[in-house]
Image (spheres, rainbow, N blue to C red):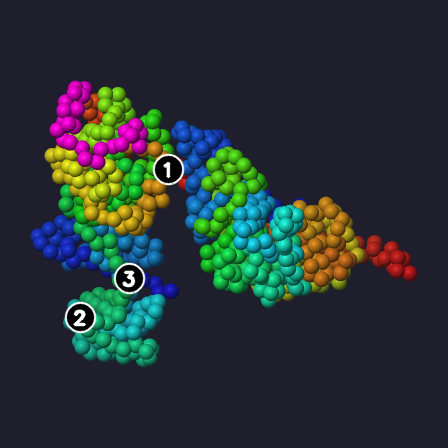
Amino acid sequence: MIQWQKVILKLGELVLKGRNRHRFEKTVYEQVKRVLAPWPGITYRREFGRIVLTLGTVPYEDIRPRLAKVLGLGSFSPAVTCGLSLEEVQEASLQVMAALGDTPRTFKVNVRRVNKQFPHDSQEMNRLVGGPILRAYPSLRVDVHRPDAELRIELREEEVLIYCVSDEGAGGFPLGSNGRAMLMLSGGIDSPVAGFLALRQGLRVEAVHFHSYPFTSEKSQEKVKDLARKLCPYAGPVKLHMVPFTSVQTRIHEAYRDNLLITILRRTMLRITERLAELHGAGAIVTGESLGQVASQTLSSMNAIGRVVELPMIRPLVCMEKAEIIRIAERIDTYETSILPYEDCCTLFLPPSPSTNPNLKVIQSIERNLVWLEEEIDKAVGATETILITEEDAEQDRYSSLF
Amino acid sequence: MIYMDYAATTPMDEEVIGAMTQVMRSHYGNPSSLHRVGVEAEKLVQRSRETIAAAVGVLSSEIRFTSGGTESNNLAILGAARRYRSRGAHLITTQVEHASVYEAFRLLEGEGFRVTYLGVDETGAVRLDELEAALTEDTILVSVMAVNNEMGRIQPIEEIGRLLKSRPRTLFHVDAVQAVGKLPLQPKGWGIDLLSAAAHKLHGPKGTGFLYCREGVELQPLLAGGGQEDGLRPGTENVPALVGMAKAVRLAVERQEAFAAHTSSLRRKLVERIGTLEALRYNGSRQSGEMAPHIVHFSYPGMKSEVLVYALEQQGVCVSARSACSSGTERPSRVLEAMGAPYAAAVSGVRLSFSLRETAEDIERVCEALTRVARELGSVTAEPQKGRRS
């Protein structure tokens, strides 16, 4: 096994454009340090458009899955270093080639000579390094235009960096580079995926969950915490606002239980979420709505529900197919948790046939009759409990000594 | 006193006892309860499942908790045969399986299944060509143990898995009670559908075990009751024991390499000494790679096993006459007979089994005890045996 000494992290191309570059780079740098915090031996150096890690004794394979979750990171490559002599460069290059699982069919050598003291120039180096590699792999050919593998050699002032393989980064925008939003997190399959897509688009996300305890079980609240936790590798610690919805919900149900009930409940949730957004400085609301999935997600339902708030509504899944959503849920590892069968507040008090075509005027007049609604919303906002969800949840730690 | 009966059971690890004590004190909830106390207990059950799954390299949804090796074996064999009866009624196992496998197959014979009991060679190994020849269109289950509990012979599980790979309708069950945490096992890579394990063989608590049941394999439950373990194994979970098992499995797998290296060297010493004692007859393969590193088996032809057990105990060494589960019986060992041992050897088998805890000095003391016992008993038996012959 090859011992990688360095990792070269490259920021996504998207990020390199525009005047925000410096801020974007700084954010990615901070996220890299966050995900690698468990390995204090790693040191960091920021360079133009990239970050170079020195691993010390840390195996590259250990940190690889963590790096793959840093948003805004385009790619990362493990590298070896060696001294500034031709023989060392040749030998290290052979090692890097040997570390490729399968020998590629074509390759090229790409030398950058920053250190002008080095006795051979880039052209010569291509030949001097490429020669021994071609001798070692008789089936290998050089292709300078579209090679399967590109062996990169950087001749620097102090040392030489050599790398070839690249792992794909998570891409997207750096965390929080586009502001902050409230994510309505239900416990189903869709909303965690919406949260992930919002994060990837550079939104810092706080989650809002409506629970109807004791009508819904404590397990369903645990499930939502678990889902929020799954976003932590991408987002860092996530704030989860648990809104007690029982009282609002039962009072609305007492006053009105016909086919517009769901519409009215959803509108009430949005109003509470908007209030929480104001309190926590968020500029948008993210939902997992997907066009046509359920009665409350028809076009006219979405219109009737969405009209109640003024903040931008972001619906990353709105035109996605269920299968696509499930694929992402599996990739971010929320699917198995999402399908656990616990009651949530939306499945309680279901009207016999929820309207798929609600009339906004009718809804507004029903709501005008619910004179106490504003006060109930105040109470719910006031009683909201905010929990900070971290990747290593406190309970996990409490139990970990047992295992 | 030197305990040399780890294949029967193992002393519990102090860390495991500590974890279990804490669970018994603080997490007494029923995992099925909806309140907080129950939710906490359920989390512990889930963490146990995840810990074990990670240690053996399977999905946590593929781990089913049971009361131990016997139940895991019964659930796998009876559950699979009864569930898939419509596919065929032929089953294959070996003559050297543990009673909890063997008797389950006897039971199925009573239910109308046809069972082929494969023989073994003189080292105790199943022969692949015999297995292949026994397979029919009707074969729905093959059950072969990973390590023989009496002899310590390792069976060619990986090869059997490969042989069965082209037969998706034939399930492959492995009784790995003597192997988990001791030898490398790859349920996924080796095409194993069902795999049994017990906690008390690896310094965990008695009365708890698990069955790996590959995703997609369905079993008919043995017990009727609540919906625990996906309805496959109803009954309130033994939370402290599950936590203890998870910890024990994790520790055993982490220490597996060290275990193999250490016990192999102890085993070599014991085998060498047995070879120098004329009265004793080493059983099993001479290739050390074919034998579990922590089990040594020998016979003292002409002497009943129990006599040897008592004699060694007087020398301060605890051993087993074949498997502990059947050591009360007078009958010759089914395993030794299957290996072709003569009657005199088959009634006089003794098993020494040890762990990472025994030192080279312990083994030296055991060797000395063996030498003394062989000498002393030899002088006792010489006369009557002669007399009987004349």
Q: Is residue A47 left or right of residue A402?
A: left
Q: In the rendering, at what x and y percent does residue A219 appear? A: 37, 33
- Residue span colored magenta: A347-372
Please determine whether, in this image, residue A105 is positioned above or below residue B324.
Answer: below
The residue that disc 2 covers is: A113
The residue that disc 3 covers is: A78
- Tell me where residue A75 sits by quadrant: bottom left
- Tell me where residue B381 sits by quadrant: bottom right
The residue that disc 1 covers is: A341
Q: In the rendering, at what x and y percent does residue B163 appear? A: 52, 63
Residue A170 belongs to the span the image colors magenta: no
Q: State the residue at coordinates (63%, 54%).
A: B114
Alpha carbon separation for disc pair 3 and 1: 42 Å
Residue A355 belongs to the span the image colors magenta: yes
Residue A207: which disc?
A: none
Residue contact at pointers 3 and 1, CB within 8 angstroms: no
Is residue B43 or residue A22 the one in the foreground?
B43
Q: Is residue B109 visible?
A: yes
Label 2, secondary structure: give it: strand
Q: Which quadrant of the rendered structure holds the N terminus of chain A? A: bottom left
Q: Are marks 2 and 1 on the same chain?
A: yes
- The mark that comes first in sequence, 3 or 2, is 3
Three-letter code, disc 3: Pro
